[in-house]
Amino acid sequence: MRHETIELDLDGKAVPVPRELADRLAAAAAARAGVSAQHRDLSLLLARGLESGHASLGHGEVRVLCAVLEEELDRFGPAAAELVRAVV
């Protein structure tokens, strides 16, 4: 049975993230993969996290995650705002 959340390890800080948000973030990062290898890496890490229920992001991936969130924060909803607060 799949959980409704996945656990993101954000440079040592464990944060539960709704599966739907992680999926949307992975898609947004993948859409920018042609522009940035870091976006590609983030999309791959999140995709693996969706399969396993856990993803570990280092400092660089967390920076890119914040950039993706900030680009379209309104689109991702309140869970994204909570994730931004958890990163800071």
Image (cartoon, rainbow, N blue to C red):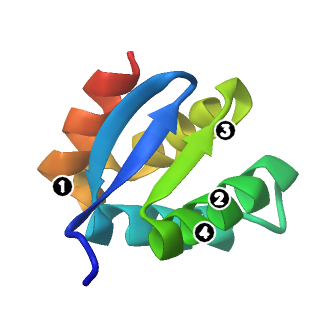
Q: What's the residue type where badge 4 is placed?
A: Arg
Spatial CA span between label 4 and label 2? 5 Å
Residue picked out by circle 2: 45
Point out the image quarter for the C terminus. top left
Q: Which mark is residue 48?
A: 4
Q: Dot 4: within a 10 Å radius of its alpha carbon, few (fewer than 14), some, or many (20 or more) residues? A: some
Which of the marked residues, 4 or 3, is nearer the chain's N terminus?
A: 4
Mark 2 is surrounded, within 10 Å at the Cα level, by few (under 14), some (14 to 19) or many (20 or more) other residues, namely some
| Circles 4 and 2: CB atoms closer than 8 Å | yes
x, y percentage for residue 16? 28, 45
Q: Residue furthest left?
A: 78
Distance from label 2 to label 1 (Cα)? 21 Å
Q: CA distance from mark 1 to mark 3?
A: 21 Å
Instruction: Indicate the secondary structure of the residue bearing disc 4.
Output: helix
Given residues 28 and 5, the one toward you in this image is: 5
Q: Residue furthest bottom?
A: 1
Answer with mark 2 or mark 1, whichever residue precedes in sequence.
2
Marked residue nearer the N-terminal end (1 or 3): 3
Residue hosting label 3: 61
Closest to the camera, between mark 2 and mark 1, is 2
Disc 4 from disc 3: Cα separation: 14 Å
Q: Amino acid at mark 2?
A: Leu
Residue occupying the point 46% across, 61% down: 25
